[in-house]
Image (cartoon, grey):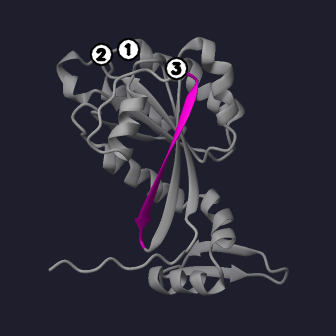
Amino acid sequence: MSKPRSESINTIPIPCKIIFLGESGVGKTTIINRYVQKNKFDPENTIAAISFNKKIRIDQLEFELQIWDTAGQEQYRSITTLFYKEASVCILVYDITIKSSFTQIKDYWYNSVKEKGAKDVILAIIGNKCDLFEKEEVSQDEVKDYCESINAIFKVVSAKEGIGIDKLFEEIIEKFKESQFMEELINKYLNKEQRKTLIDSKKLKLDNDEDNSNKFKKKKCC
């Protein structure tokens, strides 16, 4: 008999805004559909932008992922940039079988995010269509080196086969939990008692200074 799921510490989910960027046809929509709607595979292109919401629970915390799917066509780029600023996570997607889709990440999408996105935005670069590995035009070593140079998560996935997508989002949320965004949100969405429960259960330290401002930190090991 399976154990009952423990209740979330927070009654109001902590929001995490995620934006998908990249050239048209690389698979942004299909990756999102695979994650949000599980078995749905929809290869159609997005016009302008559309949002999806998904609630998840990790380590007794409930999050609401606000996932924005954006169009990659050049005529929509001025609209797409309007969604950058409030995003905590930017996921840049390329097609492993099309070299130019990765080149555009380096030449346009990354620079656009750094110019118009949040200062400490969490970056991930995702190679889609790993089920077509035999047609690969982009070296994974090249992408790994680039990701290391810009401090980005790197994953390869297959939206068609549903490979690697859950792990992608798990890693992104783990990084979000340790980010400046989380530090700012923790006091807004958790009351004093909820914060204490989190501190006690996860061995985290919440420092209060005299003006009642708070910092959310990992407790140092002895």
- Find the distance from the CA under tag 3 to the CA under tag 1: 16 Å
Can you say whether 123 is above or below 103 in the image? below
User: At x 44% / y 74%, what residue is drawn?
Assistant: 60
Give the secondary structure at mark 1.
helix
User: At x 52% / y 20%, what residue is drawn?
Assistant: 72
Q: What kind of residue is marked 1?
A: Lys
Within 10 Å of disc 3 (Cα), the crowding (few <14, some 14-19, many 20+) is many
Q: Find out whether residue 174 is within the magenta segment.
A: no
Q: What kind of residue is marked 2?
A: Glu
| Nearer-N-terminus badge (3/1) | 3
Can you say whether 53 is above or below 142 in the image? below
Tell me where residue 202 appears, x and y as whole percent.
Answer: 46, 79
Looking at the rendered structure, which numbered label has been put on residue 99?
A: 1
Within 10 Å of disc 1 (Cα), the crowding (few <14, some 14-19, many 20+) is some
Tell me where residue 67 appears, x and y as whole percent.
Answer: 51, 43
Give the dominant element type of the magenta stretch: helix, strand or loop: strand
Please give left or right for residue 153 compared with residue 109 in the image. Answer: left
Instruction: State the image quarter where residue 195 is shown.
Output: bottom right
Looking at the rendered structure, which numbered label has been put on residue 137?
A: 2
Looking at the rendered structure, which numbered label has been put on residue 72?
A: 3
User: At x 30% / y 17%, what residue is drawn?
Assistant: 97
Quadrant of the snapshot with the N terminus: bottom left
* Magenta extent: 47-59
- Find the distance from the CA under tag 2 to the CA under tag 1: 5 Å
Looking at the rendered structure, which numbered label has been put on residue 145?
A: none
Give the secondary structure at mark 2.
loop
